Structures are given as C-alpha cells and as structure tokens.
Image (cartoon, helix red, strand yellow):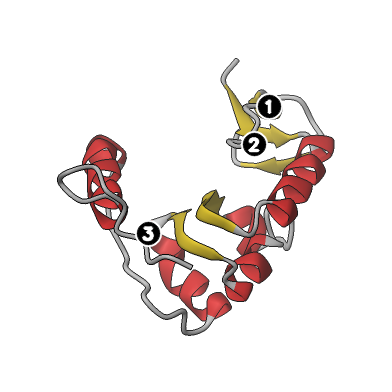
Amino acid sequence: MAGIDVVDVRTGERRSLAEQDGLPGGLRVGPHRFDETAIAWGRDRLDAACPCDILVVDEIGPLELERGAGWVNALRVLRVGDYRVAVIVVRPRLVEAVRAALGALPGTTVVERSVETAGDAVSELLSLVVDDDGHGRLPAD
C-alpha cells in the first residue's frame, strides 16, 4: 500500500497524509484516501510557515482547486507574499487555474518538468536562489 506524507520542513515532523487503498469513504482523490486530521495539521503548518525565505507547497491540485479542500489556504498564503521565494507544485492541466486563483504575483516563473526531469527542476530552482559560489541571490530585507 503506497502512501503520501506531509512534512513540516522546519521541524522535520511528518504525518501520514494519504494511503493508496480500495477502502470506501473518506476524502478521496483517485486511488488515495486522505486523512483529514493530517490535512488540518498541514494547513496549520502552512499558516505558520511565513514569514520565511523559501515557501514550498507540494501540491496545489484537484483537492484544492476542484473540491475546496487540502491546502486550499495555500492560495491565501501565497497571495499575502510574506516569503522571498515560493515553490509550488502544480499539475500541468491546472497551471492556468492556479494562475487565475492567485492573480498577478510579481516575479512569477513557471518551471515545467515531468517526474522524469524533476531533478533538473530542483537544480534550476536552486540556481534562482544560490549563485555559483553558494551565495544567496535573495535580496536582503
């Protein structure tokens, strides 16, 4: 049985977010059944994440955009903009819906990658915030 965890990267604390199973009921997307207690915990972590240098939201997807559940508060947190850089994972078919939900965020860059090229995306994202000598590219406060 495959699962998905939610992780607070500040503390390393994690919770089991979803299991891939055939059990009925609960909040489901495709083969995954989501733990609503873990979703609430993750939303709390997201609300407390800012201010921060780098905000990572993996992912804004069908749960948020089509069902108003999951990390739906991520849209508000992103619009407030109390971070230097945000990395948001979005399925290709939902990129335009996320853009519409967020409005015009200054400095937005879309990096399109498949699962097969995800490592390239990590390198590209790091190059946005760290120069070749390992120094930060982020502006000082």
- Horizontal side of residue 122 vs 98, given as left or right: left
| Residue assigned mark 2 | 8
Task: Say few, some or many: other residues with alpha carbon within 10 Å of mark 2 (under 14 / 14 to 19 / 20 or more).
Answer: some
Q: Position of residue 18 (x, y in %)?
A: 67, 31
| Residue assigned mark 3 | 92
| Residue assigned mark 1 | 13
Residue shown at the point (27%, 50%) measured from the top left? 130
* Placement of 5 over or under 72, stated as above or below: above
Res 26 label: none
- Horizontal side of residue 22 vs 118, given as left or right: right
Circle 3: residue type = Pro
Circle 2: residue type = Asp
Task: Say few, some or many: other residues with alpha carbon within 10 Å of mark 1 (under 14 / 14 to 19 / 20 or more).
Answer: few
Q: Position of residue 54 (x, y in %)?
A: 48, 53
Circle 2: element type: loop
Circle 1: residue type = Glu
Q: Position of residue 109 (x, y in %)?
A: 32, 68
Residue shown at the point (64%, 36%) measured from the top left? 8
